[in-house]
Amino acid sequence: MRITNPGPRRGSLIPGTRKRAHRVVAVAALSAMVLGLTAACGGGDDPTKSAEQKDLEKGETLTITTFGEFGYDALIEEWNAANPDIQVEQTKVSLWDDWKNELNTLLQANEGLPDVVAIEGDFMPALVAAPERWVDLSSDEVEGRWLDFKTEAATTPDGALVGYATDAGPEAICYRADLFEKAGLPTDREEVAALMGTWDDYFALGEQFVDALPSTKWYDASGSIAQAMLNQVEFPFEKSDNTVDVENPELKAVYETVTGHTEKLSTKASQWGDDWTAGFKNDGFATIPCPGWMRSNIRDNTGDPAPDGIDWDIADVFPGGGGNWGGSYLAVPKSSPHQKEAQEFAAWITAPEQELKVFQAQGNVPAQVAALEDPVMLEATDAYFNDAPTGQIYSNRAAAITVQPYHGPLYSDILGKFQDAINRVDQGGDPGDSWDKFVAEVAALQ
């Protein structure tokens, strides 16, 4: 699906879009999730105990709450037509941050949760750390369905699967072919891909572009590039034992690389902000890290059809190899009195056949191995992006992912602080001072 604020995946600046801005998750809320909220504030029942199971009564519906745009409207209509005894009603919340806050409130009260809960990928560590609140969704039916890193992120140490992956966010590079032409660079997507194999290549090409076309920046936001590079670091903030380590050389290298290119290559806009949005229409930048869901943001912010002279394309490349940005899950809380039906529905709507339909309608890249290899996927194109073979591109980009950052309990909190540090430099702050403040802020989180 399209993305959030953390990530990403889901928040939207306008209806029908999702963003992946990374904001700080309240430490108290996340801690409450991790602790399992063993003392419910309002419901009175043991929050780790399954609710009494019962059949859906006449007029009663199975409920699901999503955020942003999961592309489920038509699929739920299809399910309801085929399953008259298990009718599903969807509630949509526009932003992940809003749903996250409501979700934490409902968990603390131990009442009011829907039967199926959509969870942003970066929040899964909280569920994995408190699995007693959630139904184990593992079964032979779904064994091997998803990309390994998606399954691993939702699996507890003792093997419980607490979420079904809805989509993934393999990254490519979207670029303005018209601006490349003005700068004297190749515009053919294969030629462009050949020029961006490494991050050094990418930044060097950016220097060449800005020298030729100084009125336009190379990329959309420093925070965007920082997130893209972090997606290739195995332990960006925490070690595998959840020990915080933000002084590691890989994280420092990302920070120094991004802040070192701020002045010449970055728009200095805050991703998802008004200036960032305006940059799509005013020739503000030439390239953007582009997971599948980003295409909808590009289309919405640029205009559909695109204004005369604006020509977007997609290169089948991501500097440094592969990277994943985004992807959500469906979970079933133990407070649901209809767990069997909820799991049945969640398994159906995250099956390869359904995720292919979402990809065709919405652009969200499937997280399922079978879907990524399906001819429907591999033959898909996108007219808005110069008829780019998007299905083949994103299938290739998914296959290129070799590293998935470790997400410990404080990942989202620290990520927000890291993005703040990048933004301070964008606004003229000293890189060294901003880094020191980041380290101090992270220490205060522990």
Image (spheres, rainbow, N blue to C red):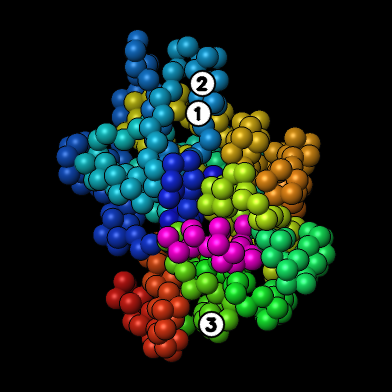
Name the secondary structure under disc 1: helix
Which disc, if any, is residue 73? 1
**Residue 248 screen position, x and y as percent:** 51, 81
Q: Are marks 1 and 2 in contact (CB under 8 Å)?
A: yes
Q: Which amino acid does label 1 sit on?
A: Asp
View extreme (front): residue: 308
Of tags 3 and 2, the one toward the viewer is 3
Q: Distance between the residues labelled 3 and 2?
A: 50 Å
Q: Are marks 3 and 2 in contact (CB under 8 Å)?
A: no
Which disc, if any, is residue 77? 2
- Direction from residue 120 to residue 41 in the image, left or right: left
Q: Which amino acid does label 2 sit on?
A: Glu
Of tags 3 and 1, the one toward the viewer is 3
- Direction from residue 265 to residue 320 in the image, left or right: right
Name the secondary structure under disc 2: helix
Q: Which residue is drawn at 55% across and 62% down?
A: 282
**Residue 126 screen position, x and y as percent:** 39, 54
Q: Quadrant of the N terminus?
A: top right
**Residue 259 screen position, x and y as percent:** 52, 81
**Residue 83 screen position, x and y as percent:** 51, 15
Q: Give the range drawn in magenta.
A: 274-290
The reply to whether residue 132 is visible in this rendering is no
Location of residue 206 (image quadrant): bottom right
Name the secondary structure under disc 3: helix
